[in-house]
Image: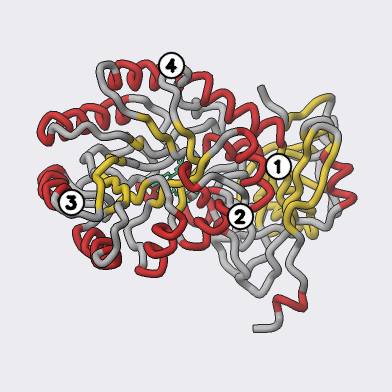
Amino acid sequence: MNFIRLRKNNLWVDNILAIKLAKKYKTPFYCYSHSQIQNNFEALNNAFKAVNPMICFSVKSNSNLSLLKELKKMGSGADVVSIGELLKATKAGINNKKIVFSGIGKTEEEIRMAIKKGVLLINVESESEVNLINNILKNTSKKISIGIRLNPNVAGKTHQKISTGGKDEKFGLIYKDFINLSKKIIKMKNLKLEGISVHIGSQITNVQPFKKVLSAINKIINKTRINFKFIDLGGGMGISYSKKEKQINLLEYAKAVSKFIKNKKTKIIFEPGRFIIGNAGILITKIIHIKKSNKKYFIILDAGMNNFMRTALYGAIHQIIPLKKTNNSFKGNLSFVGPVCESSDKFLNEKKFSKLAIGDYVAIANVGAYGMSLSSNYNSRPTIAEVMVKGSEHKVIRQRQSLESLINN
Ligand code: LLP
């Protein structure tokens, strides 16, 4: 079900006409559909019903506080990778026992905070991290739950820059190191080895790599004979960014996981980001100039790579939708670009599009995940607002940064 859709030539977000929002809020701004988020969250839960997983939303994909509060109401936990994300998740009211702390470079300050908050699991990625945690705890009677992140040597079959599971990547511990570290942790009085975690990359649309990961985990369990209380399968479930690209088959994945946990007493954890929020967000932007140059029409938007980085960073293709489609079309070489002084500040090339004029609005689609969270002040432009639409209501859930705050540093 799509809650952000073109109907009779108008783009709608839940029950609101996007053009109405564009006229009310200063562009560019992010806009999210609450119904879509809920729909995605439930779709994931339903597909994995037999497994009854703990869903820990990956905060890095979108860390808006109001959004985290909504996810908390839906029953989500959080996967965090920094002290900032941890404090945001707890501020949103997410139960500490539903928070997993991941990441390869946790600092002492971050580990102390995770211990203080009593998170469910600290997923470690190196021996030195284990030593650091052990040192922090050595004069206490505390016992902290630890997961080890396995590097399963499975490539996620995704964009090279978002693949994390290959043996040459910096993430996790390869088989032999995992076994050695697990032996060491078991002997430490302040640590409880309760989890095994993996995350092989993002935007994975094929179930095959996930199946290989399950086999790699089984190999570890057979070798160590540890009954891990938690098996954290990470995130990575891919969504459809274009007609050619199909969303991952969740039912097939769920079937594999059900088979995997048969005869195991373990709780499955997922850390999805993109699957929950990716298609629930659009970036509404205005055309500020149209310039013809050497047979090409540059459609210059007020949103740039500072607001949305995925295209410049990964060459990711995001569809652009007119808020009001006309019956006449614009034919020719169109290039939608931003105002930033970089040639990589471009979004999409099209050969045919609804007729456009200066002052019209368009939406960059499927930007809910890694949109706002990757944005910056590059070219000294303020960070932009975020708006949540819920049914027929809408409200700002992050104010646009003021020029005053921008120019203070
Ligand atoms: N768990 C861990 C340990 C992760 O590193 C990540 C993402 C996730 C969960 C969530 O993955 P998801 O379900 O969203 O695929 N900026 C890139 C994506 C980077 C992903 C980093 N890690 C992009 O825009 O495509």
Of the two numbered discs 3 and 4 in the rendering, the one whose residue sits closer to the viewer: 3
Closer to the N terminus: mark 4 or mark 1?
1
Type of amino acid at the residue the image marks with label 2: Lys
Type of amino acid at the residue the image marks with label 1: Tyr
Closer to the N terminus: mark 3 or mark 4?
4
- Find disc 3 in the rendering and name its residue: 185
x and y, in percent, of residue 399 in the image? 76, 60
- Find disc 1 in the rendering and name its residue: 32
Which labelled disc corresponds to residue 91?
2
Secondary element under disc 4, as helix, strand or loop, is: loop
- Crowding at dot 1, Cα within 10 Å, few <14 / some 14-19 / many 20+, comes out as many
Q: Quadrant of the N terminus?
A: top right
x and y, in percent, of residue 325 in the image? 82, 34
Secondary element under disc 1, as helix, strand or loop, is: strand
Which labelled disc corresponds to residue 50?
4
Closer to the N terminus: mark 1 or mark 3?
1
x and y, in percent, of residue 340 in the image? 64, 67
Type of amino acid at the residue the image marks with label 4: Ala
Q: Mark 3 and ligand 1: say if the CB distance to the nearest ligand atom is below 8 Å.
A: no
The one nearer the camera, 275 or 104, is 104
Secondary element under disc 3, as helix, strand or loop, is: helix
Closer to the N terminus: mark 4 or mark 2?
4
User: Which residue lies at the image location 63% right of the left edge and 69% below the top edge?
Assistant: 377
Type of amino acid at the residue the image marks with label 3: Ile
Distance (Cα) linking label 1 and label 3: 43 Å
Q: Give the quadrant of residue 402.
A: bottom right
Q: Are marks 4 and 1 in contact (CB under 8 Å)?
A: no
Of the two numbered discs 1 and 3 in the rendering, the one whose residue sits closer to the viewer: 3
- Crowding at dot 2, Cα within 10 Å, few <14 / some 14-19 / many 20+, comes out as few
User: Which residue lies at the image location 39% right of the left edge and 47% below the top edge?
Assistant: 162
